[in-house]
Image: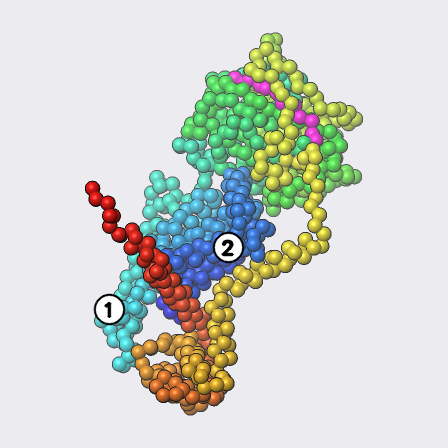
């Protein structure tokens, strides 16, 4: 194996070892196998291109082209020619997937589901980083700068992860980089020879600079190891010794405190810390007041945030990426077009004593007009203060949707998306079995998830013998849930958390919302929200309706109308008239096709449209054609690296086909073709041609370097003698047995070469470079013919002819 090939393998290994840091971010992790396979193809193309050899810029361009073909075949082959050649539609599809992936990254917490967009970002990023490392370390032989793209890849992984075993991935990435540096040092020494003292292992053998009993030749390698070990030790020890560095490279956390210049994520402070204290305050101090044009304000809860992670010890909000607040918030996830929706307007004023990082909003909000530094978290549809921004003294206007599903729509809701169900039905292993057993017993006889949810709510609110008590010790873990089911007393935290956990054990996606109940109506038409209105309630997800509020806590809030028996199915409600203080009249909610963003529509989050498009019908011919095109595209992708082998087989067959002629007139062509075949076969087996030697000396050189036996050696000399005869004799004469001689030489060379050498000669023949030479000569000939054509000379003469006019 040559030094450059070994260096390319080290570049591949370093890239994949660093890419391992991305594994905790996405599940399942099958994408890394696909990334490794595509990166191996990309690296193999670079190895073959450098073997030709091609110019550096051509090598990089070829690798970029192959990368585009690989990504097209993997993610956008539906409209590609032969499944791999991209067109405008495929480029647009890749761009849409990248946009979709960016939205998914900001939407999901880690580990995120491996959607097509996220997979494209991961695999495409690994391929681009791998290409940069290959170009720097192998093509341009500068391994040290190749650490920069590796560091960028690790930094992205560390910035999006939650820490955990990040130091393991850092060590792997560092070891991969050190391996790359050592491989480059070894390759440089192998090219320059022994540069330090020391003797060779074999007397009289060439000094390699890498061996010797004295050990001096190993000085550069030992020095590289020491430098790498010291650098790695500094990277590990210094951040731990200096807390001000906040963990250094190994922290890998994406959270913050809510301060800083618009960071990408903000870790939520759990609002449950003060919820029980607020409920037990002797004075119900006002925290905010609001005016709304809603028909029934008592159903409008003011939501702060959702707690969607249950790790066994607590329910807590996920740390998600934030974005700027859009002018109009996107369509709520899962809300279909056949559900009655009314849009209302609400003006809210927070008191100067109320300081909260999250902005209380009716759910689901559609528009928010607020001053200050606020960021938007799409999954929970919440606004989070940035750079120290709080709700203190804020005045803002909110447009929100009143979603009014019927019991039939909830009962007939289809199964949720697999990725959403996987995320929101996850329960810790420490959850006692009594939770699921109780949930199954309470909901026995229910025929769908809606009926199970209603039975859980009614059991907590009335049928289960629970008692509301705010003095019970608060707790959010599995032990608190088990104690609550046993003692049957607690407040909203216990009711909401236990119902959400039980719903998850039944396979119903659930989370817990925290905020305020609607408050108390005032004489001036406003509503006042006090400390004792702090509340927590479960939200369950139903496809076609979205996240839906339930109220299991007795004597608190209001039971949703869609959970009551004998619910009449009415038509869409008309928008309520705004109150005197409202800034704008509400309008009916727009249709799904008008408000649903393209990304959510692609993911099926907007429910069924009013007029679904007819399904495509192509019959069996469409399926057969698709299979044929995909198969043909796969064959093209597989055949690209084998093109040199195909050309070599064709060239050899053509030369041997002409080896037996019929007349002496073409004897020279036949003999020279056989000689060319022997020369190229020797070249493929590691004996480059030497055009400066006579045929006789060239034959002796092939016999000596190829270690040919008597039969093969005699065949080489016979063909060389035939070449001299046709080149120098007055009249060339026909020679018989040329094909047999060529085949004997080929068999002798293969027998004297190892297995890897024979495989290399077959799959990547060195003589295939003659194609490049022939194209270059043809281009030069065309250029010369264009430059010297007579018409051009006549026009040039006319242009140069002096004018007969005189001034």
Residue 143: x and y in percent read: 34, 58
Residue 72: x and y in percent read: 53, 52
Q: Which residues are magenta?
A: 338-350
Residue 693: x and y in percent read: 31, 81
Dot 1 corresponds to which residue?
Answer: 195
- The residue shown at (57%, 12%) is 581
Screen quadrant of the N terminus:
bottom left
How far apart are the two marked residues, 1 and 2, measured between alpha carbons? 44 Å
Q: Is residue 345 magenta?
A: yes
Residue 701: x and y in percent read: 35, 83
Left or right, 291 with respect to 746, comes to right
Q: Main secondary structure of the magenta part?
A: strand
Check the image and tell me how it is coloured. rainbow
- Disc 1 vs disc 2: which is toward the camera? 2
Pointer 2 local density, CA inside 10 Å: few below 14, some 14–19, many at least 20: some
N-terminal of the pair, mark 1 or mark 2, is 2
- The residue shown at (48%, 88%) is 737
Count numbered badges in the picture.
2
Q: Is residue 728 magenta?
A: no
Screen quadrant of the C terminus:
top left
621 w.r.t. 53: above or below: above
80 w.r.t. 592: above or below: below
Left or right, 412 with respect to 532, comes to right
Pick the residue in front: 233 or 187: 187
Secondary element at image label 2: helix
Which label was assigned to residue 69?
2
Pick the residue in front: 442 or 231: 231
Pick the residue in front: 460 or 632: 632
Specify the farthest residue to the left.
807
- The residue shown at (44%, 31%) is 258
């Amino acid at each position: 194996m040559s030094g450059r090939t070994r260096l390319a393998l080290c570049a591949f290994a370093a890239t994949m070892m660093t890419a391992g840091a991305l594994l905790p971010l996405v599940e399942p992790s099958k994408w890394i196998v696909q990334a490794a396979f595509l990166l191996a193809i990309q690296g193999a193309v670079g190895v073959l291109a450098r073997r030709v050899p091609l110019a550096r810029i051509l090598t990089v361009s070829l690798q970029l082209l192959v990368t585009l073909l690989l990504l097209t075949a993997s993610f956008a082959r539906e409209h590609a020619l032969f499944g791999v050649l991209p067109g405008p539609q495929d480029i647009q599809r890749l761009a849409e997937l990248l946009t979709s992936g960016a939205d998914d990254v900001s939407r999901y917490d880690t580990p995120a589901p491996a959607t097509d967009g996220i997979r494209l970002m991961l695999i495409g990023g690994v391929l681009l980083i791998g290409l940069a490392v290959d170009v720097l370390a192998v093509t341009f032989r500068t391994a040290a700068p190749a650490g920069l793209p590796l560091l960028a890849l690790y930094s992205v992984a560390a910035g999006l992860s939650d820490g955990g075993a990040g130091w393991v991935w850092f060590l792997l990435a560092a070891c991969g980089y050190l391996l790359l540096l050592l491989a480059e040092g070894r390759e440089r020494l192998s090219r320059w020879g022994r540069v330090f003292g020391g003797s060779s292992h074999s007397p009289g053998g060439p000094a390699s600079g890498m061996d010797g009993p004295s050990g001096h030749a190993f000085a550069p390698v030992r020095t590289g190891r020491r430098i790498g070990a010291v650098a790695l030790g500094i990277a590990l020890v210094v951040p731990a010794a200096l807390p001000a560095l906040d963990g250094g490279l190994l922290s890998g956390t994406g959270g913050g405190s809510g301060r800083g210049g618009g960071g990408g994520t903000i870790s939520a402070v759990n609002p449950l810390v003060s919820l029980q204290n607020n409920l037990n305050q002797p004075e119900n101090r006002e925290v905010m007041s609001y005016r709304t044009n809603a028909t029934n304000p008592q159903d409008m809860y003011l939501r702060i945030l959702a707690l969607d992670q249950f790790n066994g010890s607590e329910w807590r909000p996920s740390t998600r990426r934030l974005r700027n607040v859009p002018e109009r918030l996107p369509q709520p996830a899962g809300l279909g077009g056949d559900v009655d929706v009314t849009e209302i307007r609400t003006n809210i004023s927070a008191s100067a004593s109320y300081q909260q990082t999250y902005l209380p909003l009716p759910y689901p909000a559609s528009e928010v007009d607020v001053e200050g530094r606020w960021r938007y978290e799409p999954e929970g549809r919440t606004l989070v203060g940035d750079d120290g921004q709080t709700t203190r003294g804020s005045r803002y206007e909110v447009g929100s949707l009143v979603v009014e599903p019927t019991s039939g729509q909830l009962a007939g809701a289809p199964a949720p998306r697999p990725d959403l169900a996987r995320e929101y039905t996850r329960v810790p292993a420490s959850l006692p079995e009594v939770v699921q057993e109780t949930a199954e017993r309470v909901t026995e006889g229910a025929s769908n998830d809606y009926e199970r949810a209603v039975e859980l709510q009614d059991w907590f609110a009335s049928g289960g013998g629970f008692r509301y008590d705010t003095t019970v010790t608060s707790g959010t873990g599995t032990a608190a849930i088990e104690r609550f089911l046993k003692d049957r007393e607690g407040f909203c935290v216990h009711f909401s958390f236990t119902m959400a956990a039980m719903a998850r054990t039944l396979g119903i996606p659930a989370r817990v919302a925290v905020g305020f109940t609607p408050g108390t109506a005032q004489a001036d038409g406003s509503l006042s929200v006090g400390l004792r209105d702090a509340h927590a309630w479960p939200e369950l997800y139903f496809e076609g309706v979205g996240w839906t509020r339930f109220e299991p806590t007795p004597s608190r809030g209001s039971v949703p109308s869609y959970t009551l028996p004998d619910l009449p199915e009415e038509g869409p409600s008309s928008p309520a008239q705004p109150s005197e203080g409202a800034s704008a009249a509400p309008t009916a909610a727009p249709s799904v096709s008008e408000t649903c963003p393209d990304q959510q529509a692609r993911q099926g989050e907007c429910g069924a449209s009013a007029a679904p498009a007819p399904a495509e019908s192509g019959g069996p011919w469409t399926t057969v054609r698709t299979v044929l095109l995909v198969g043909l595209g796969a064959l093209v992708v597989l055949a690209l690296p084998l093109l040199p082998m195909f050309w070599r087989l064709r060239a050899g067959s053509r030369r041997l086909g002409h080896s037996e002629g019929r007349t002496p007139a073409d004897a020279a062509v036949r003999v020279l073709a056989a000689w060319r075949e022997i020369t190229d076969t020797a070249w493929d087996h590691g004996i480059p041609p030497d055009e400066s030697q006579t045929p006789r000396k060239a034959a002796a050189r092939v016999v000596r370097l190829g270690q040919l036996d008597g039969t093969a050696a005699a065949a080489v000399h016979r063909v060389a003698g035939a070449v001299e005869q046709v080149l120098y004799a007055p009249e060339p004469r026909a020679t018989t047995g040329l094909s047999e001689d060529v085949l004997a030489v080929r068999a002798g060379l293969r027998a004297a070469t190892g297995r890897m050498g024979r495989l290399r000669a077959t799959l990547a023949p060195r003589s295939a470079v003659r194609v490049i030479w022939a194209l270059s000569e043809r281009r030069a000939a065309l250029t010369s013919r264009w430059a010297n054509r007579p018409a051009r000379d006549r026009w040039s003469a006319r242009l140069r002819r002096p004018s007969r006019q005189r001034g």
